[in-house]
Amino acid sequence: MTKAERIEKEKRMLQEMQVYEGALREQGVRYIAGIDEVGRGPLAGPVVAAAVILPEDFDVLGVNDSKKLSEKRREELFIRIKEKAVAWAIGMADNQTIDEVNILQATKRAMIEAVENLSVKPEHLLIDAVKLEDLEIPQTSIIKGDEKSLSVAAASILAKVTRDHMMVEYAKEYPGYAFEKNKGYGTKAHYEGIYARGICPIHRRTFLKSLKL
């Protein structure tokens, strides 16, 4: 694929991923927040959510589900999205909260915190696969929202890069688990670290019940 073809493809995707946003804007809704989280599955670290309100003329190409992007591309888009956004914010729930209330409830808490941290109050929420019952803002839950909504995809990138940066810092504080590489997921190196060193303060104990330590 030539560079021109790639750019043309990304322009088409930019349009296609604004179906939900476009329908809401036609109804007069101005501030639409996309919300997504990263970190439901890892054995360690927080679950991190992001909320982002994009302008109607948002023109940054390449925004997609964060899992489909290279680390380099995510880092570039992380900066561009923050520059262009009307507002953006992060929320999180740590491993202790996850152990106390379960991962789904912790995810919802992180998402609500992200929404409440926005400097502009959203009029509608587009959320990846979750319903936030504790918020009275109108909302649409979208299965695989990070693939279908530009706002949710942008939120997935902000959440992913924020969490990855945190896990790299945790790797310095708690060496031996390869957090800088696995970001807390259950890789071979991570399990070897657990068996050699035991669990550390950021491990999710409810995720490690089955291990004989």
Image (cartoon, helix red, strand yellow):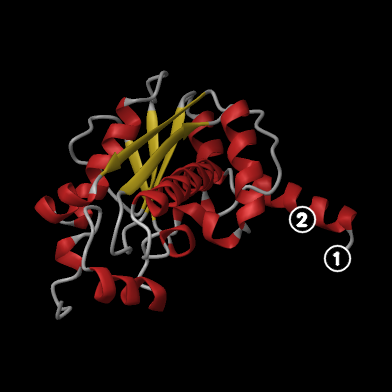
**Among the two numbered marks 1 and 2 on one chain, the one whose residue lies closer to the N terminus:** 1
Q: Residue at x 55, y 31 (%)?
A: 54
What is the x, y in percent for residue 44? 29, 59
Q: Residues within 10 Å of mark 1 (few under 14, many from 20)?
A: few
- How far apart in space, not on screen, are marks 1 and 2 (Cα)? 10 Å
Q: Name the residue under label 2.
A: 9
What's the amino acid at mark 2? Lys
Q: Name the residue under label 1.
A: 1
Out of 211 and 18, give the one closest to the viewer: 211
Residue 128 coordinates in the image, percent (x, y): 39, 51
Name the quadrant of the C terminus: bottom left
Residue drawn at x 41%, y 18% is 119
- In depth, the one of 45 and 155 nearer the eye is 45
Q: To which quarter of the image does residue 102 belong?
A: bottom left
Q: Is mark 2 on a helix, strand or loop?
A: helix
Image quadrant holding the N terminus, namely bottom right
Q: Give the image location of residue 167, x and y in percent.
A: 41, 51
Label 2 packing within 10 angstroms: few (<14), some (14-19), many (20+)? some
On residue 32, the disc is none
> Picture coordinates of residue 144 (x, y %)?
44, 59
Q: Nearer the viewer, mark 1 or mark 2?
A: 1
Give the residue displayed 36% in from the left and 56% down from the top.
Answer: 39
Contact (Cβ within 8 Å) of mark 1 with mark 2: yes
Q: In the figure, is residue 57 to the left or right of 11? A: left
**Three-letter amino acid code at disc 1?**
Met
